[in-house]
Amino acid sequence: MAGNRLQSLTLQAFRLLPVKYIDLRLNQISSIVPDEPDFLRHVTQLDVRDNRLSELDASLFPRLEVLHCQRNRIGHLRLRGCTLKALHASNNELHELEVSPAASNLTYMDVSRNRLDALPDWLSDSKKLEVLDVSHNCISELPQWLFCSSSLRKVLAGHNRLQRLPDRVDRPVVEVLDVQHNQLVELPCNLFLKSDSLRCLNASANKLESLPPSSLSEESSSILQELYLTNNHLTDKCVPLLTGHSHLRILHIAYNHLQTFPASKMAKLEELEEVDLSGNRLKAVPTTILNCRRMHTLIAHSNAIEVFPEVMQLMDMKCVDLSCNELMEITLPENLPPKLQELDLTGNPRLNLDHKTLEQLNNIRCFRIDPPPTSFSASEAAAGPAVWSHGYTEASGVKNKLCVAALSVSSFCGSREALYGVFDGDRNVEVPYLLQCTMNDILAEELHRTKSEEDYMTNTFLVMQRKLGTAGQKLGGSAVLCHIRHDPTDPTGCFTLTAANVGKCQAVLCRDGKALPLSLLHNIGLEEEYSRVRQHKAIITEDNKVNGVTDSTRIMGYSFLYPAVLPRPYVHTLTLTPRDEFFILGSRGLFEALDPDEAVEAVRKVPDALAAAKKLCTLAQAYGCTDSLSAVVVQLSVAEDCCCCCCSSAAPQPPPSPGPGLYPPSSSAGVPPSSCSEISSEVSASEMSSEVGSTASSDEPQILLQEAHLHLHQQTHQALQPNPNTRLLPCCSLHPASSVTPGATSCTVATSIMAVASSFQRQLSSATFSSALSDNGLDSEDEEPIAGVFSNGSRVEVEADIHCLHLLQPPPPPPPPPSTPEAPEEAGPIDLVAEMSASATVNISQQAEKVGNPGTTTEVPSKTLGGKRRGNGSVAPQERSHNLIEVAADEPSKKSGGYFTAPAQPDPDDQFIIPPELEEEVKEIMKQHQQEQQRPTKSDQPTDYYDTPL
């Protein structure tokens, strides 16, 4: 009878039905009409989950064994305990629980997330109770018999108001004890001495200042394997007390007041596999960590560590996180651990790595390090202070499988926009990586197609659903995007924040120190979602999942569940004010371990965004999260007038892109580069499904390219007509509009390149992708790569760095006859393909030296101003240029492997890629241009007027 619209339950209807199991889930039952208990003796299981009950008298079922009444409004529950074995009553408003007679056969009891202020007295007579969950209540004291029970094996009492635990500990058989998020100052002094079976203790988020001893002698009988003490007040005096737990495998002691960890004490913890020392005041990791031969995870961020530990000599090492420290150099052995997958060194401003070290770290799947400092030009520095800064982090789950991805673009489609996102694939890695590589491009395109905030965000998710291809048929993932934008037509307007989410990824804004949710979780708990799912004949299983697959009714992927499951997001738009301090984007696991209020409070006083994101993930892991985690923290600094970036001295915006659907030129003025970048190898092919993402790259870019060819082709023929009164727009961000006079034109080749480059400009180098994969333009492994897109094995480089040459305009020649048109000297942009390889560099310095005053030799530098020549022949300027399409980090070449692997990068030929149909026309124009250069031309400009060539 589940999934109907019953509002009242009449028990007389079950008199003549000899059923044992009654399923009344997902109804609207608010009242029950009782009947004589003798007529209901055959019922042993009752399920009334997800109804509207405010009171339940289950004593009418005298032989009831299992009761499910979660997610109701029950305040008073009455039961018969003669045959009761399991009670599931979480997510209610219980303040009174009455069972008579005593439940002597009760083995499982879950009354979490209620309003109980004490455990019921009858519970002491339940001699078979094994699991007790009373978390998220208002309990201030636990009964004395709790640690004397001979049957209780798991006690979950976190998120209460406990100030102390029972002092009486008499050989309990408790294996798991969770007392996190209470007000405990100390633990029972004999807790470890007499708890012979205790394997896992979580006492995080308390006020502990000391720990009980593990033994009274050098020998200890402790079998404790997991100890979580994060977010307490522990000092160095507690470290010696840990050595008695010789079987300890996992130790989380982050965010305490530790200043040292003696090497002699670490040496005794030989079975340690995972240790988290983050958020303390440590200056070094003990060298005796080499005694821990099984160590695979070391997390010690947010300390003051100056010396890189010798953990690289441990062959089982998989993850090392030493971010936000004071490292200056690292020393590596000749051979790195073969299982090493993650190394995070971001947030160490004084760290200097040579090329040999970078080459040695090349094989690590995920290697993060700060980017080199970027010098801004005068015009960019004058654009005003930054309004936002961000930090992000990721953490693998228990199986060392990273199923999350983060997206951070601090300068998105201009200096007044930013885009941040978090994607969670639950147990698959394909969908989050595809979302990360593609979603920002789709959103940039939709910004030009729609004007409404809700429409362009909604369209972005719907288009992305189609681009998932085969990956989105049987796989799915949650996603959340936050887009900061400023109306370019209103210079005095305010910044707006648009958030959109599907699935369980969420965003929360801190306004006036309070958490303001920006997301909505779509599940069958929402009446409109439940009605829609039922309308499409979908099956809702007992765990509230649609067809037993997902409990989210709106999520990316899972196309085979359409139309019951949709990718349409929840969109929320608000105006940013000076009261807004920061906002957080988090994956599913983050907000399952931390509620929004706690997350905001935890990082509100952390000045650095990267350290704040790190802290969120560390706290989530200490509080019990075992899944992959991702967090993005964006700190805001909005002025009173809401226009910090609106400055009269800001750099001029380049001309708009021609053609429909093309990306606008981006400006990075006023926004610093992202706080961290990543040099990452690719995930092994064994982790990526061969059938996934065959349509990850859409065919739309090729269509847009054809449209751009046609548009530029028409512009070329129009520009061939002489027009001496035409004032040319600036074609390079390094040349302000004031330097372009009506008498000066751009070089034909350089101008055409700039026109094309500005039309197809992608995201700037400030876009930091946190996963190990990046899109190289391949639809699948068996298709040909897109022309002009090359990869060095792990990071795609699509770069155009072309500077303009301004030549003096000679007197216009007489117009040629229509039958034989010739290109005048002020010819407009020629028609060239927009996709240029990062390795292709135009060297026209020799031609530039020949142009100028007769008999005058102009010395032109061989490098770009402030730039650095790459190993592949291209030049990447240090300043942020509008001509930059997409720049990868200057890093050693990565080994091939993974889903997005591109062909090996070809040697640069220093030539353009010209479409065959335009080859003759380009040759003719180039020939005419060379003839014009050979002619002596009088110039009124100084000899150093020419810009620096590549």
Image (spheres, rainbow, N blue to C red):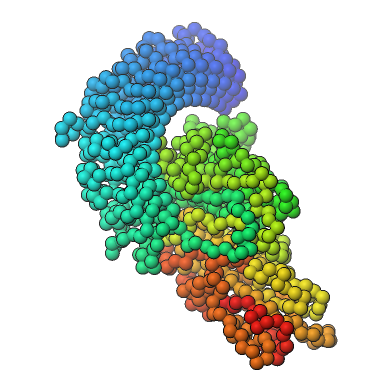
Q: Quadrant of the C terminus?
A: bottom right
- Left or right, 19 with reference to 741: left
Q: How many marks?
A: 0
x%, y% of residue 108?
A: 37, 23
x%, y% of residue 395?
A: 42, 47
- Left or right, 749 with reference to 215: right
> Relative to the observer, which residue lies in front, 805 or 365?
805
Q: Quadrant of residue 2?
A: top right
x%, y% of residue 728?
A: 75, 72
Task: Tell me if I can see residue 626 in this picture.
Answer: no
Q: Is residue 178 above or below residue 847?
A: above
> Relative to the observer, which residue lies in front, 867 or 919?
867
The residue that appears at 55% across and 47% down in the rendered structure is 634
The residue that appears at 28% across and 64% down in the rendered structure is 334
The residue that appears at 62% across and 30% down in the rendered structure is 527
Task: Tell me if I can see residue 805 in this picture.
Answer: yes
Q: Is residue 941 above or below residue 625?
A: below
Q: Quadrant of residue 41?
A: top left
> Relative to the observer, which residue lies in front, 893 or 946?
946
Q: Is residue 660 above or below residue 927?
A: above
Q: Is residue 912 above or below residue 215?
A: below
Q: Quadrant of the N terminus?
A: top right
The residue that appears at 46% across and 42% down in the rendered structure is 616
> Relative to the observer, which residue lies in front, 556 or 794?
794
